Amino acid sequence: MTQESVLQNNHQKISKKDRNVPSRKEREKQTRQHEILSSAKKLFLEKGYHRTTLEEIAQHAEFGKGTIYNYFSSKEELFFGILNSLAEEAHKIAESSINISGNVHDKFTSYAMGLISYAEVNSDIFQLIIQEMHNLNSSENDAKLRGLRKRYTNVIRLLAELITDEIKKKNVRKLDPLKLAKLFDSMVQFFCVNHFGPHKIDKVDNIDDEVALMVSVFFNGISEPKAKG
């Protein structure tokens, strides 16, 4: 490769990198959106979703109400903004989990621990979401709900890819990887709802042990292995 080709290739890489870096205007927009969502989340938790007004959110974020409308058209859209940020974080947890070193058990353990820890830290907002979700199921919100389901599906696909690899290695039976991934995720979500939801029914003694049991049952079942011979 000639020096000119090397310089051109490096220039193309730099240009591509620059295109991925947000502009100052975009960074300022993201910062404002984050500040507005943080204020909305805080007030929703303190006063409740229905008792909080856009005027109060604007005042808390130290913006004019008109500024709020530049980013969110309604209080409901603000609520979906919070839901989207939580879904994005769940996707990051899944991505980081599948990229750790170790076997599939380690990766599923990392995913479960990450999601449970996140649910514990954000238990208040999750309780609020559980209480309000039934009010958001309307035809007007179909597009937003589809967007959330798509994010969830993307997380499930990441887990399904790991299961597919295990099927190819003949470590897992030939079952639908997506259904298996949903099954495991449902176990984790059920654990979170029971321990951190609005109607907690169990006390967490040792999350490590609980997750280890979950992963073991998922991959090995509950039957005693039959002796050969």
Image (cartoon, helix red, strand yellow):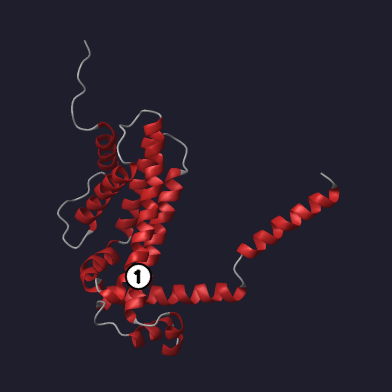
Q: Position of residue 112 (x, y in %)?
A: 33, 46
- Residue 88: quarter of image: bottom left
Q: Residue at x 23, y 50 (%)?
A: 191
Q: Is 20 positioned to the left or the right of 10 in the image? A: left
Q: Of all residues shown, which one is farthest toward the top?
A: 229
Q: Is 2 positioned to the left or the right of 118 in the image? A: right
- Residue 110: quarter of image: top left
Residue for badge 1 = 144
**Residue closer to the observer: 122 or 176:** 176
Q: Position of residue 113 (x, y in %)?
A: 34, 47
Q: Residue at x 31, y 70 (%)?
A: 142
Q: Residues within 10 Å of mark 1 (few under 14, many from 20)?
A: some
> Height in image: 207 above or below 86?
above
Q: Is 164 positioned to the left or the right of 224 in the image? A: right
Q: What's under tag 1, amino acid-wise?
A: Lys
Q: Residue at x 70, y 61 (%)?
A: 15
> Height in image: 127 above or below 59?
above
